[in-house]
Amino acid sequence: MKCHEGSRPGRKRCKHTATKPNDSDVLCGRGGLTNYHPGNIRFRELVGEEKSRYVGLGNSKKEKTYFSEHILRTVHNYGGRFLKKDKAGKWFVVDNDVARKKCSQALREK
């Protein structure tokens, strides 16, 4: 595991190399691989089921952030990780801030 200082004071960002994504993982990135990966399909289904609750929160950024964290915890609870490829083509686990932002973006999409 490689760690370095994160963007926020006192936080470290760590890369955990994952040799092979599992079917529960959410792959970050663009293209066919991510669109058709079983973990991404499950993630989109989860987001679709929860989106009306998210929209119902109105303009409260704090509540929407908590809700995105709920989606993140749900993925982690069923054994999923949020993975991204590094420049060498190896998968690594992104930190929770990056994963939460992916959840937030997915909830905002129409």
Image (cartoon, rainbow, N blue to C red):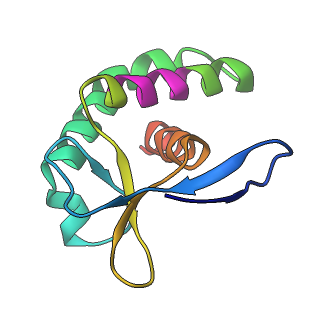
Front in this rendered view, residue 43 or 60: 43
**Where residue 31 appears, x then y in whole percent?**
27, 72
Residue at position x 25%, y 32% in the image? 79
Residue 73 shown in magenta: yes
Residue 80 shown in magenta: no
**Where residue 103 appears, x then y in whole percent?**
47, 39
Residue 29 is drawn in which quadrant?
Answer: bottom left
Vertical arrangement, residue 58 with respect to residue 16, above or below:
above
Q: Quadrant of the C terminus?
A: top left
Vertical arrangement, residue 15 with respect to residue 109, above or below:
below
Residue at position x 19%, y 37% in the image? 42
Q: Is residue 18 left or right of residue 6?
A: left
Residue 78 is drawn in which quadrant?
Answer: top left
- Report how many numbered discs are placed on residues in the image: 0
**Where residue 3 appears, x then y in whole percent?**
62, 58
Q: Is residue 80 left or right of residue 103?
A: left
Residue at position x 57%, y 45% in the image? 101
Magenta segment = 67-74
**Where residue 48 appears, x then y in whole percent?**
30, 30
In this view, the residue farthest toward the bottom is 88
Vertical arrangement, residue 31 with respect to residue 104, above or below:
below
In this view, the residue farthest toward the front is 1
Main structural element of the magenta stretch: helix, strand or loop? helix
Front in this rendered view, residue 64 or 70: 70
